[in-house]
Amino acid sequence: MADISSRTLQAIERRANASPEAFTCIASVLETDFENLWNEQEMPTEEQPKMPWPSAEVKDVMEYISDIKAFYIHLFASVVTITGLTIINLFLTLGYC
């Protein structure tokens, strides 16, 4: 067996560029010539299908969700700030009551 990791083999199967050393190891295991494997790698590959971009409706929904998230973040920050200031005010004005 060739001393190649499974990740390297998976990358080669996905038509990723592989090093000459990897092809040399594979060629020795398959008992074939290095040049045959190397030339096959450089063959043009099928273009991967592209994922469709989100539609306008999906973009609008994502923007709406982002706005809601921003609102709740600001609400939380405001509640924490007001609570903190109220506690500080109570401790600093204990002698005035």
Image (cartoon, rainbow, N blue to C red):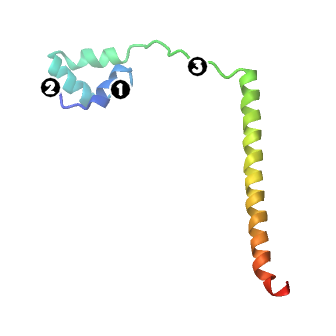
For label 3, the crowd category at 10 Å Cα-Cα, with few meaning under 14, some 14 to 19 and many 20 or more, is few
Q: Earlier in the sequence, mark 3 or mark 2?
A: 2
Work out whether residue 19 can be spotted.
no
Q: Which residue is drawn at 37% across and 18% down?
A: 42
**Amino acid type, label 1:** Ala
Q: Return the mark for residue 11.
A: 1
Element type where label 3 sits in the image: loop
Q: Earlier in the sequence, mark 2 or mark 1?
A: 2
Is residue 55 left or right of 35 when viewed as pictured? right
Q: Return the mark for residue 51.
A: 3
State the residue in front, 82 or 48. Answer: 82
Q: Residue at x 27, y 17 (%)?
A: 37
For label 1, the crowd category at 10 Å Cα-Cα, with few meaning under 14, some 14 to 19 and many 20 or more, is few
State the residue in front, 32 or 90. Answer: 90
**Amino acid type, label 2:** Met
Cβ atoms at labels 1 and 3 below 8 Å apart: no
Work out whether residue 34 can be spotted.
yes
